Amino acid sequence: MRRVHTVVTLIAVLNLCGATGPCRAQARKDARSPVEQGIRNVTGGLADFPPAPPSGDAQAAKKATLSERMAALKVPGASIAVVDAGRIEWARGFGVIRAGQPAPVTTETIFEAASTTKLVTAVIALHLVEQGKLGLDEDVNARLKSWKIPESDLTRTQKVTLRRLLTHQAGLNRPEGGFTVAPGGEPTLLQVLDGKTPAENKPAAVESEPGSKWNYSNFDFLVIQLLVEEALGKPFPQIAREMVFGPLGMTSSTFTHPVPAALRTRTIVPHDEEGNAHDRPLSPTALGQGGLLTTPSDLARFTIELMHAYQGRSSRLLSRGSVQAMLSQVVPLDPAQFGGIISGQGLGVFLLGTGRNLAFLHPGANVPGATCMLVGLPATGQGAVIMTNAANGELLMIQLMLTIQKEYGWPLEIAQGP
């Protein structure tokens, strides 16, 4: 995730919509309109964001279509999967894989999940906790073999644990500037963690006492990746394939880089804020924080499984108890920092609201330009996944998610700040 404020902004607009009470979604469903009507309602008039000033001019008040917003924001391609009543209600692709070329985005087009990857990594780690192969509250250095978190006075009494890694309380640096690589280089995961050539990032280091504060860090999930790989003696792409993708039928998902030949022609190209394409491959080794390639439909299947487990209807990935623990607040995030409307941090996921109004979500944004947003409401079996191939897709996702929320009447609860 490039900018944490994206979480704030998205949650804000979702809550503002949810606070308005019943909307046209209920009328649409009461009338038993076809699925296609819902698609037209979502794509035919996106919610304004930022909101447009009041106007008596009907033409000026007319909402823009999805295609118009994509053109204005220089987003060549987008893909959406909407979940309702615990199943995929519909999925559609829009635009093109690469600007200036004809290959269209379809429901089979593969996008970068970016930091939404962290939710998948968290589930894998919690699965191993259930099996007794990892502990949530043990010192991870007692488990790691090939690399250790550097010890210091900060870790003398408080240790880095899996729970703290999952909740961004481990005290590790971010690092600023991301994980850049020297031209032609291909660093190992250990080289990335150590900040050694050809990796160009600063090394992982504890900068605050573990457990003392929340600090979003990609390093947290690279350490989790290493924990998982060493616990099972397998590479992360194989673990994800065997534990998650296979059981859920996520046939268009991979952590393998370069992209397998069978998937290459339907994988997006990232675009910067000006809409320029960049053929930039993802790291083949640093994966747990943002290396997932997938489709909205595959991520929707993953979302549905978590909701079913939360409801006690499935345990293919995690037990009901584990998912309920995962979706329980561990860190109360400062309401002032997040606009007064975010509930907190769960185990590898952001949370909003409680009870029937509980939502779990995770945004993602990779440089130079690929975005993702996953939202699930476990009590009602509703949600959505939106993915784009452009930096300005962040704003488009907010507009789309707000529109979907209104159309399907998601119940959401504002977490009031001081």
Image (cartoon, helix red, strand yellow):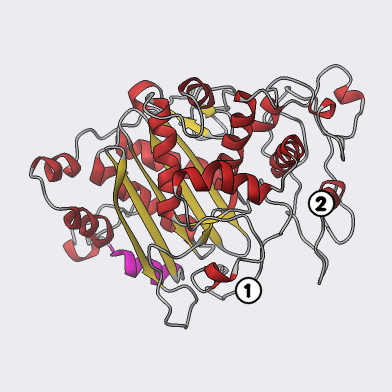
Query: Vertical placement of 415 versus 109: above or below?
Result: above
Report the amino acid beneath label 1: Asp
Q: Is residue 193 left or right of residue 317?
A: right
Q: Residues within 10 Å of mark 2 (few under 14, many from 20)?
A: many
Where residue 87 appears, x then y in whole percent? 30, 43
Residue 226 lies in the magenta stretch: no
Q: Nearer the viewer, residue 404 or 337?
A: 404
Q: Quadrant of residue 370?
A: bottom right
Mark 1 falls on what kind of element?
loop
Residue position marked by numbered label 1 in the rendering:
279
Q: Nearer the viewer, residue 98 or 392?
A: 98
Residue position marked by numbered label 2 in the rendering:
192
Q: Is residue 50 visible?
A: no
Query: Vertical placement of 402 versus 252: above or below?
Result: above
Q: Residue at x 60, y 66 (%)?
A: 260
Q: Residue at x 71, y 48 (%)?
A: 235
Where residue 60 appears, x then y in whole percent? 24, 64
Specify the farthest residue to the top.
157
Q: CA distance from mark 1 to mark 2?
A: 22 Å
Report the amino acid beneath label 2: Val
Q: Which residues are magenta?
A: 64-73
